[in-house]
Image (cartoon, coloured by chain):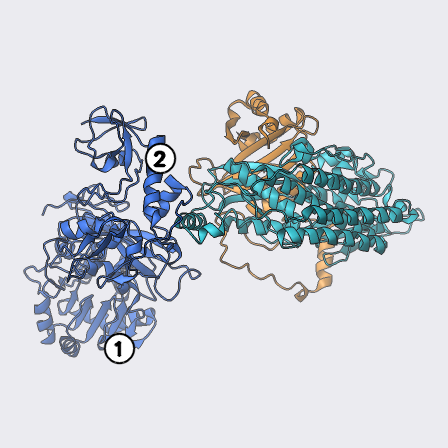
Chain colours: A cyan, B orange, C blue
Amino acid sequence: MDIAQKLPQWKAGREDGFDIEPLYINMGPSHPAMHGTVKMVLKLDGETVVGSEVEIGYLHRCFEKTVEMKTWNQVIPYTDRLNYVSPLINNMGYCLAVEKLLGVKVPERTDYIRVIMCELSRIGDHLTCIGAGAMELGALTAFLYFLKARESSWQLIEEVTGARLTISYGRVGGVVRDLPANFAERWAWVRSQVEQNMEEVSVLLNTNRIFLDRMKGVGVMPLDRVLSYGMTGPFARSSGFDYDVRRDEPYFAYDRVRFDVPVRTDGDNWARYQVRMEEIRQSVRIIDQALAQMPEGPVRLEDPKVTLPRKKEVYSNIEALMNHFKLLMPGHGIRPPQGEIYSAVEGGNGELGFWLVSDGGDRPWRVRVRPPCFPIMSGVEELILGEQVADIVPIFGSVNMIGGELDR
Amino acid sequence: MSPANSSPAFAEELRAALGPRLLRVESWQGREAAVVEPEAWLEAVRLLKSRGYDFLMDLSAADYSGFPGHQAPPLGVSLQLFGSGTRRRAWLKAYLPLEGARLATLSDEFACANWYERECWDMFGVEFVGHPHLKRLLLYEEFQGHPLRKDYPILKSQPLIPMRNAVDYESVAAARRAAADEDGLGRG
Amino acid sequence: MPKLSIDGREVEVPAGTNLIEAARLLDLEIPHFCYHPGLSVAGNCRMCLVEVEKAPKLQIACNTAVAEGMVVRTDSDKVKKARAGVMEFLLLNHPIDCPICDCAGECYLQDYYMEHDLKASRLEEGKNKKEKAQPIGPHVMLDKERCVLCSRCVRFTDEVSKTHELGIFGRGSTEEIALAPGKTLDNPYSGCVVDLCPVGALTDRDFRFKSRPWFLKETATICGGCAMGCSVVLDTNTNPYNKVGQDRAYRLFPRENREVNGWWMCDEGRYSHHSVDRGRSQGPRLRGKGVPADFALARLAAEAAPLVKAHPGRAAFLLSPRLTNESLFAFRRLAESLGVAQVEFGDDLKAEGRADGFLIQADRNPNSRGARELGLGPRPGVLGGRDLLKAAQGGAFDVVFVLEHALDPAALKALAAATKVLAGFHVQEPVEAGIYTVHLPLAHAFEQDGTFTNVQGRVQRNRKALEPLGDSLPAYAWAQRLGAALGVPQAPDGPEALFRAWTQGRPELAGAVFEPLAAAAPAAA
């Protein structure tokens, strides 16, 4: 789409007849606002963007090729590095896809744990996005407050999984270990931090004239363009596309918890800000319900063909040792039957899809990640057309592009 | 996806419209993929779009060379469609040969197909006929080969790119401006 | 032939076949430990229990002969329970050795546990301790704790090697395999018990701790130790990331071939894989100095070509019964184009030993019969090996090509003194490589594709498992280069084309194809 199509009233040139040329500016890839490295070549008429080319791929690390050489479980650390702001969602999304290929169902407690951890990650993702977006507009305080909230959620994640970012908590057939015994109290503390910080930041931003002027009416994406671009997630929901994988095609325990999916119709930065803020509150609600409903039980599928036996057993009897051995031997272990599956979960940015192809062996034949921010990024050229250069920063901030996910 | 959202009806509609050009329907775990002839790709997509599958969820490919029991040509292009109103999914596939892998572009039907197809070209070498500018998306232009193909030599390094500033920058910039299209962005 | 049904599938087999073999025809593997087609039936492991209709108890498949109309089920709950029960008993006292056991990855217990058991251990007591890591012979290590007492090794030493070295001693849970008093396991086929042992009780001392089996690539090929040409599998590992040291060939073990070697091979052949990596001639030598191949061939061309051209009668090829048919044929063709008539495979110089009446042949070369049938044996007008050497030492020949013969050093020196050009081609670097004018390295048999004709007249396919080491090449490749150097360019035929060429005009080999070549032309002895 070019500028004339988007803004019919725009015309090139100046009224006083000065002969002008457009200014080509390079924004990125090494730029404070170009999160996760992306390059935008901008064609400017004064301050207005009349054309752009977005170049991605600066964080391409050959995920899809590398994992063809790893066993199904060994892929999980690589999935951490996809959307590295909400790594647990990637872990669990991938594990879900493999479990579908295998045709197994994880224990109920695992489903709830996965819901809790995914929502914790989602909270972290949204906090980062809004916080960083606000910081780039000058609202450093909001950023620091949100980072404090994010820090508390990451501390909780660390207490459960042992890591903050490179987590690898999921396994095919469950999760690595159960939640710690004091999880409920710790969650209560995190919850209070998040709620308090959200309250503080809302006070700072919601009626802030500068913030409103820079967000309202800026970066509008109409619904028909959202659909044509295949966008999902908070970005699409802020333009009116009411679709959330958790509610509409539920997985894990999402069909057993009640939550609202915030939708706005304005499609501008302000709507995206509101949708994400509301999603944080909904995530908190989901975690509360999941904690209350969670049954006792195993957290890994008790299937000796999928799950490694407990170490205590492995070191003390030959049966478990042979089981462990054969599961880890190259050519053995988890071997989903030949087939393909496309399985989607709701990532921080929208539908995170995994297309897995299995040839019956212990390594995947093909792992395709459908990154939720990919279609959104493909629409950025159109999104910033006609906007001012300065507006690119909040617009791009509200896109929440995660380089690891976009480029893989 | 839960089987409730898989829509076998889409395969039937394709069969009615395309006849023998719908080659077969592959099915795993309750979800079905309709395999069409590459020449019927655009027609099948337009038909599905008219039946409510108006949302392109994913377009990608896989190289089935050496896949046990695979009879069709090796490069499989896979399209996940979604109905924004109906909330139903359709899965379309076409198999192409490694040499001369060509498929009609969907960039006129869906705006995001532009980038999905560029990535397919980049990684697999599938040429989308009619694409506005089919150039590499994730990798740099001078990259040789299509890495997600199974015959890509992973134990070899790419040839080093010549240093850009070894060339007179002004003349390069002038050449790019001269080669620019009307939009002036040098998308040659 | 009786027709029976196994798991609902019909199969017709000759009378007297047991159920394990009948099921194999349906690609169904009934688990078993003690049964082996090459040994008598023991029926002591009870793992092959299957349900036979009309029989009140489960029957062992290894000792149940097929009957017309028999209905067999191998997947019923009773059978599954029986298998799990047998496994539980076997695993009660089995040591927790997988990380240090060589058999891991090829172990029947591991495989059957995953397929047929997957139950947790119910053992609360400790396990019985027995002697571990006991070398019972020069090639075999015994670990008594791992033994499942299938008695395959005992039956082997009783029935096949007939040396009666092993026996089962003791009762109950102290039962163990042990050497008969005063004996050690040192018969010429001792390595076969390692192939037989379904677990890691008997392991190969030569292969001990060298590699895990899943890193090894298997190639079906032919042993070159003697004229028997036993069918073997060569295990190799060339991946720099998962091997340690320089070795590429790790072990040889026999393949089933009921017409040639049954299921067995001798120890000498079994450990001949070391010759692939040790002591190899890797680079061409010009009077002892290492030179590039082009240079060596150019010197050969300069020195030998005019001599051969002028007096082909004063040139000689001493070929070898260790070369493949394709290499022999390539050299025969080369000699014909040069007009050299003295081409013989050194029949009376070849390595010989004592036949043992079982597998080991007196002729310790893989392809004597092949060479003879290619017309390269002793014949009128052509000097035999010894006569050739004598004549050459007397000055009758200017140019002699020696391929793969371990010649006596003194004879070699005399030969070198009496000839103008002495070219040598060997797989192993000869000690006196400097004596040769030009010495060129030959690829080992396991590094080339080709065929050998064994003592039975069976043409068997030798498969390439590794790339030739260093600059070595198969003999036929050297023949082509020699031809170019000597001014008689040869067709650049690979082994398949050479095979087609030499099998032409051989009616008994009509219809034989190179790939896959299952033994062609069974013996017209």
Q: Are marks 2 and 1 in contact (CB under 8 Å)?
A: no
Q: Is residue A140 visible?
A: yes
* Residue C287 - label: 1
Do pointers 2 and 1 mark residues of a single chain? yes
Residue with the mark numbered 2? C80
Image position of B173 (left or right of C495): right
Residue located 45% across and 44% down the image: A361
> Does residue C284 sit above or below B158 in this rendering?
below
Residue located 54% across and 41% down the image: A98
Which of the 4 image quadrants contains residue C361? bottom left
Residue A80 x/y as whole percent:
62, 50
Q: Residue furthest right?
A: A16
Which of the 4 image quadrants contains residue C206? bottom left
What is the chain letter for disc 2?
C
Image position of A326 (left or right of B183): left
Residue C367 x/y as whole percent:
17, 56
Q: Residue furthest top?
A: B16
Residue located 18% across and 56% down the image: C189
**What amino acid is at disc 1?**
Arg
Q: Secondary structure at mark 1?
A: loop
Of B141 and C132, the residue lying toward us = C132
